[in-house]
């Protein structure tokens, strides 16, 4: 199908060849622009060495993985590190413990944790609290049985408490 109406198309083959060549060049240019616009700008993540001493101290459990974190995740962790001085001792202890646990997880385990978190967003705070209370009422044996069942299950669940099922 011609790009121009027959009345506006060049008549000689010399002009037709130039027209075809120009169309190809313009087409390639448009494709290049479209591709460059569709790809998110590749912003460099911040190197560990550029963190200040306080940030490195707080985020130490993540040092090994820091370079593999994308810019958004690094920004999130830097915000946490910057809030650290205002946290209570209990909050600081909890943060350090969780960060160390997170750093010890494999990539697959981290993705599973993110997926579980996203699934929990659909439950109300009251329902989550009731499920946690129900779980706390279980005996150690029942908790172990529930954990074993979770470990052998092929389909991950958000919360293993019977209250949310």
Image (cartoon, grey):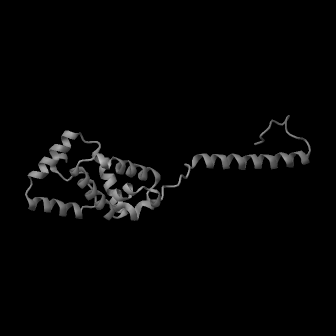
- Tell me if residue 80 comes above or below residue 5 in the rendering: below
Residue sitting nearer the eye, 14 or 159:
159
- Tell me if residue 61 comes above or below residue 35 in the rendering: below
Residue sitting nearer the eye, 154 or 90:
90
Q: Indicate the quadrant where residue 67 lies.
A: bottom left
Residue 66, x across and y down, in percent: 42, 60
Say which residue appears at 35% left-offset and 59% top-offset: 57
Say which residue appears at 62% left-offset and 49% top-offset: 36
- Quadrant of the image for the N terminus? top right
Is 90 situated left or right of 71 in this image?
left
Say which residue appears at 19% left-offset and 39% top-offset: 126
Residue 92, x across and y down, in percent: 26, 52
Is 107 situated left or right of 23 in this image?
left
Q: How many marks?
A: 0
Say which residue appears at 21% left-offset and 51% top-offset: 90
Q: Indicate the quadrant where residue 12 lies.
A: top right
Residue 11, x across and y down, in percent: 90, 41
Residue 62, x across and y down, in percent: 37, 61
Is 125 situated left or right of 43 in this image?
left
């Amino acid at each position: 199908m011609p790009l121009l109406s027959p009345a506006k198309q060049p008549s000689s083959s010399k002009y037709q060849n130039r027209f075809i060549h120009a169309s190809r060049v313009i087409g390639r240019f448009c494709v290049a622009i479209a591709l460059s616009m569709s790809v998110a700008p590749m912003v460099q993540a911040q190197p560990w060495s550029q963190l200040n001493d306080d940030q490195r101290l707080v985020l130490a459990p993540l040092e090994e993985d820091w370079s593999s974190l994308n810019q958004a995740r690094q920004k999130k962790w830097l915000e946490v590190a910057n809030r650290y001085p205002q946290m209570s001792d209990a909050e600081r202890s909890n943060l350090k413990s969780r960060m160390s646990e997170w750093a010890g997880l494999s990539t697959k385990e981290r993705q599973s944790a993110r997926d579980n978190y996203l699934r929990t967003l659909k439950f109300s705070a009251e329902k989550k609290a009731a499920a946690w209370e129900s779980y706390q009422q279980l005996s150690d044996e029942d908790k172990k049985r529930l954990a074993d069942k979770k470990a052998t299950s092929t389909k991950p669940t958000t919360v293993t408490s019977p209250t949310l099922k």
